[in-house]
Amino acid sequence: MRCLLFLVVGSAGWLFLGAAPALADNGPHVSGASVVTDSCAGCHRAHTGKAAKLLVQSQPALCYTCHGTGNTGAATDVQAGVGYSSIARATPAAALRGGGFSYALINSAAPTGQTTTGSNSGGAVPALAVGTVAAVTSTHSVDGTSVTAWGIGAIGSGAGATVQLTCGSCHDPHGNGNYRILKAIPEQSGGTALNITDATTKVYTTGNYWKVDDTNAAGFIANVSAWCSKCHTRYLAGAGSGDTNSTDPIYTYRHRGNDTTQGGATCIQCHVAHGSNASVSGTYSNAVANPDGTAALGNSRLLRIDNRGTCQMCHKK
């Protein structure tokens, strides 16, 4: 499902153990830049723009001029799912927490269950070595094509709605002081604004994809599921929802996703924001259809573990 609209975060890179310099509210993405800032000219042309909003080129190509493979405008390569220690990209890199849009470095076939009682963060999903070629099997869409945002809308309003997503649908390129420069209301979503306070220290890479806590951002875990649900409205559910009928004919019984404790059940505990290379080859897991009943063979749903194995990380049946 190339449009599992959630993200991200983050990315959504979302989750982290190793550090990389941030370009969120830094570089050209600074809220409240001076009148004589040089930043505007990096992306806009007043009379010769080549894309809407006077952009010099369309998304994601414009974003990839800094955040793409082979470029040095940012320390985060969201195409390859790799983060570096500097924008020069000369030092060893690590896996981006949010995966990547073309490749990701999630060792999704080698997870280990939780080791700390009562804490899902006790488990591990290792990161693959940098340089490993692991093509994604699902991503959020960022090229503006029409895709389906599953679960968007009110109870009983169908499987989803058609949207056109770009990087700027979730992130504010001008900076806003929020976590990962996430928009308070993602484009083509709705509801009240939700601002997640930025991290005191920004860390974009990880060695363990199951550790999703960001201790540098006090309100991150408490708000991230509500932010994802700006689009995936009917995905968010509270305690006991697995036994409570929502009355929606499609999203009838739902896994809890609003646990605000570290290591609890949130959207990002199971999913990454940008793209996953997890495989879906099992007889049962590969037969899971899209919410509207259409086939979704081989689509990993942005999950962190092969064959929908995220269940076992917590329940260990």
Image (tube, rainbow, N blue to C red):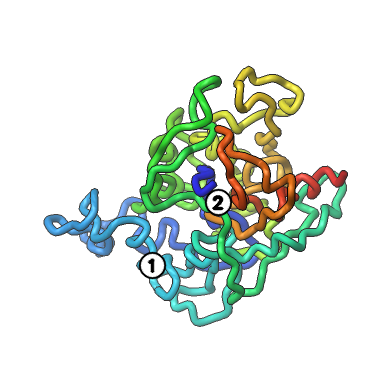
Relative side of 245 to 197, left or right: right
Q: Is residue 275 above or below residue 87?
A: above
* Rendered location of residue 21, percent (x, y): 50, 67
How many numbered tags mark residues here? 2
The residue singled out by tag 1 in the image is: 66
In the image, 17 versus 267, the foreground residue is: 267
**Which label sits on residue 38?**
none
Evaluate whether residue 10 shows in this view.
no
The residue singled out by tag 2 in the image is: 273
Please tell me whether mark 2 sits on a helix, a strand or a loop.
loop
Find the residue positioned furthest to the top.
247
* Rendered location of residue 65, percent (x, y): 35, 67
Q: Earlier in the sequence, mark 2 or mark 1?
A: 1
Q: CA distance from mark 2 to mark 1?
A: 19 Å
Residue found 69% across the figure and 19% down from its top:
245
Count neighbours of disc 2 (C-alpha within 10 A) and say few if under 14, some if 14 to 19, many if 20 or more.
Answer: many
Residue found 87% across the figure and 44% down from its top:
317
In the image, 299 versus 51, the foreground residue is: 299
Cβ atoms under marks 2 and 1 closer than 8 Å: no
Three-letter code, disc 1: Cys
Residue found 21% across the figure and 53% down from its top:
54
Three-letter code, disc 2: Ala
* Rendered location of residue 267, percent (x, y): 63, 42
Please tell me whether mark 1 sits on a helix, a strand or a loop.
helix
Q: Is residue 17 above or below residue 298?
A: below
